[in-house]
Amino acid sequence: MPKSEYETIIVEKERGRARITLNRPEKLNALSRRLQQELAQAMWDADQDTTVHCVILRGAGRAFCAGYDLTPERRREGESDARDDYPEIYRNSAAFDDDTWRMEDAQRDRMTIFDMHKPVIGQVHGYVVAGGTDLVFLCDMVIAAEDTRIGFPPVRAMGGPPAHMWTYHVGPQWAKYMLLTGEYITGKDAERIGLVLKAVPAEQLTETVEELADRLAMVHPDFLSGNKRAVNLALELQGARTMQRLAAELDARMHASPAMEDWRKLNRDEGLKNALQWRDGRFSNVEQRRAWQQEHWPEGPREPAKA
C-alpha cells in the first residue's frame, strides 16, 4: 500500500528513523482493522527500507491509543471492510472458532512489530488502554510520559487481552494484578515494575525518544536486527509466540461465558457509553462499589464458624 493511501496513520522518514503515528485523534486512536492493516504495511515497508534503522510508534492527539474501536458508526465513516467489525468479536460472535479466527487475523498484523527485524520504540502518552497495550507491549522498548494511564479494563466484564506480553515484561504477580482487577497504573509506576523502559515528564517525552533513536541510528541495521532477534528468539523459547495464539483462544473462551450476556445486553439496549460506565464505574466510585456489593452480597460479611 503506497504511503499516499494511508488513511489512519502518518509515516515520516528522516535521519535513520521512521515515525509512524496513529492518526485517529478524534477516536483517541482506537484500533480499527484498517488501522492495524495499514500499520502492518508501514512497519514492513520501514523494515525493508535500507535507510531506516528503527521505527518510532506514537499516537496523535490526547492519547496513544484508547483500545479497540467498538463503535458500529465506523461503517458510516467509510471503513467498510467487512472484517472491520469488532462488535461482532466482542458482542455477537456466532461460534468459538469464528471468534478466535478473527482475533488471530488481527493479531497477525500486530505481530509485525515483534517479527520485523528492526527495533521499534513505543512512545506513549495519555491513555494506553486495552488494544493499545496489545499493540505497544510488542515494541522492543517503550518510553512513557509519567502521567500516562495504562490498563486493560475489559477484563472486568468482557474477556481478556487477545495478546499477552504482560508476564514476560513484569512477571506473574503484576501481570495477575493488572489482568484480574483491570486497574490503571501511571507511566511512572509502569517504569517502576518494568512494564516500560523509562517514564519522563510529558514535555520531555519526544526529546527522550528521539535521543534514543539517534543512538540506534549510529548502529548498522545488521547489528540492530541480529540483537533484536536474539532477544526475541529467547522469548520464543520461553513460549512468548505460542502464548499469543493461546491468548486469543482464551479470550474467545471467556466471550462464551454466560456473564458476557450482561455486557452484550447493556450495550445493545443502552449503548456503549452506558455499558462502559456499568463496567468501570463500580471500580472507580466508592458509592457505586458499595451499592454493587449490597445488591450482590446483601447479607454482608459472614460470621466465622465456631470451633
Image (cartoon, grey):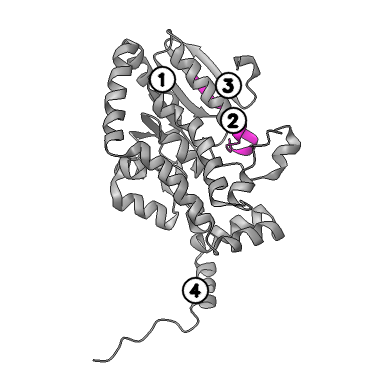
First-in-chain label (4 vs 3) = 3
Considering the image in quadrants, where does the N terminus appear?
top right
Q: Which residue is mark 3?
A: 10
First-in-chain label (4 vs 1) = 1
Marker disc for residue 35: 2
Nearer-the-camera pick, 232 or 186: 232
**Number of the front mark, 2 or 4:** 2
For the residues labelled 4 and 3, the Cα–Cα distance comes to 46 Å
Considering the image in quadrants, where does the C terminus appear?
bottom left
Nearer-the-camera pick, 121 or 112: 112
Marker disc for residue 270: none
Residue type at mark 2 is: Leu
First-in-chain label (1 vs 3) = 3
First-in-chain label (3 vs 2) = 3
Q: Which residues are magenta?
A: 19-34
Discs 2, 4 touching: Cβ within 8 Å = no
The single residue placed furthest to the left in the displayed view is 307
Give the percent coordinates (x, y) of residue 283: 49, 61
Label 4 Cα crowd, 10 Å radius (few <14 / some 14-19 / many 20+): some
